[in-house]
Amino acid sequence: MNSTALPSSPAEHDAIAAWFAGLQSRIVAGLEDIGGDRFLRDAWQREPDSPTQGSGISCVLDDGKLFERAGVMFSDVQVSQLPPTASANRPQLAGRKARATGVSLVLHPRNPHVPTVHMNVRFFRALAPTPAEQDVWWFGGGMDLTPYYGEEEDARHFHQVCFDALAPFGPEHYPAMKAWCDRYFFLKHRQEARGIGGIFFDDLNQPDFATAFALTRSVGDHFLDAYLPIVRRRMDRAYGERERTFQALRRGRYVEFNLVLDRGTLFGLASGGRTESILASMPPTAGWRYQYQPEPGTPEARLYTDFLPARDWLGVASA
């Protein structure tokens, strides 16, 4: 792991956390402006005897006019000893002290014509257990779109903004992170994508700390530009019971992914994270139907045939 130009003092790490907290505030303000509803702001602090120390702010909206459930979470937590289940991909980190800081959001709109969206940016650092060793650190994050009714205009727009966020850092990033997103947000037990993807990255510690942090900031800064124009186009479109039923079935897939496959959810639960905040990403309602198949030729079937299979939305070759 590269440690070039890594901040070494708690105060410098605090500055990273402050940027993430500011991002949360800006995103919540943008969502309140477009939807008109106000988020509940729940500032929390872990109990002294908790295995995980730290604090955060959970901004949650339930039963709003635009968003049926929305959570924009900031957390800055420390664990005194990483459990093996939280470091399964890096067994050498088990037992280390660690600090994880970031913002994670999931927005579940009421109108089925408005897509669900997820965004996350984070910084993780596992402290060296001896002076002879180095801290291990990386950034991660991304954003992805989960429509219920596919719209090519929306898909191209979302991916274009993802491309724009990464372009200043080199042409190789969007194809690689788009392909990574397609692989990651895939329900293996269904052989089906969760949505139309976006970008995803993890373990980012190259070429140096400053560049990795700048790329992560750019992803966070571009989120509202990627999502709000889609919301404005679709939020007033009429819908009925048929669309709500299909939305519930697709939300069921979202629940399956989060509880079975999502690395962040599993890490948070395994490391003693704040369960209420972690599970705020779940939709308020979801549905399952035995051997459900949409009727051929319907808009519901078109989601499966034209949108869920991985596509090169921008004409940029995938990595």
Image (cartoon, rainbow, N blue to C red):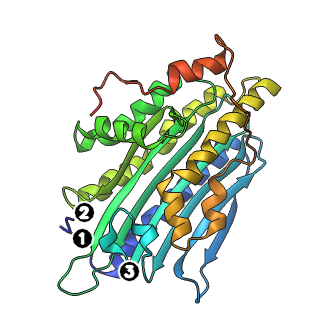
Mark 1 vs mark 3: which is more N-terminal? 1
Specify few, some or many for label 3: CA neighbours under 10 Å numbering under 14, 14-19, or 20 or more.
some
Residue 291 rendering spot, x and y as whole percentages? 69, 29
Mark 2 vs mark 3: which is more N-terminal? 3
User: Is 292 displayed left or right of 104 in the figure?
Assistant: right
* Dot 1 amino acid type: Leu
Instruction: Give the secondary structure at mark 3.
Output: loop
The residue under label 3 is 95
Specify few, some or many for label 1: CA neighbours under 10 Å numbering under 14, 14-19, or 20 or more.
some
The residue under label 2 is 209
Mark 2 vs mark 1: which is more N-terminal? 1
Residue 301 rendering spot, x and y as whole percentages? 62, 18
User: Is 257 displayed left or right of 41 in the figure?
Assistant: left
User: In front: 43, or 30?
Assistant: 43
Viewer-nearest of discs 1 and 3: 3
Residue at image point 43% right, 55% down: 121
Total labels drawn: 3
28 relative to 231, above or below = below
Instruction: Give the secondary structure at mark 2.
Output: helix
Residue at image point 65% right, 57% down: 280
Q: Quadrant of the N terminus?
A: bottom left
Residue at image point 59% right, 17% down: 302
The residue under label 1 is 6
Residue 38 seen: no
Whole-number angstrom distance, CA of label 1 to CA of label 3 = 22 Å
User: In front: 236, or 188?
Assistant: 188
The answer to whether the residue labelled 2 contacts the one labelled 1, judged by CB atoms less than 8 Å apart, is yes
* Dot 2 amino acid type: Phe
Specify few, some or many for label 2: CA neighbours under 10 Å numbering under 14, 14-19, or 20 or more.
some
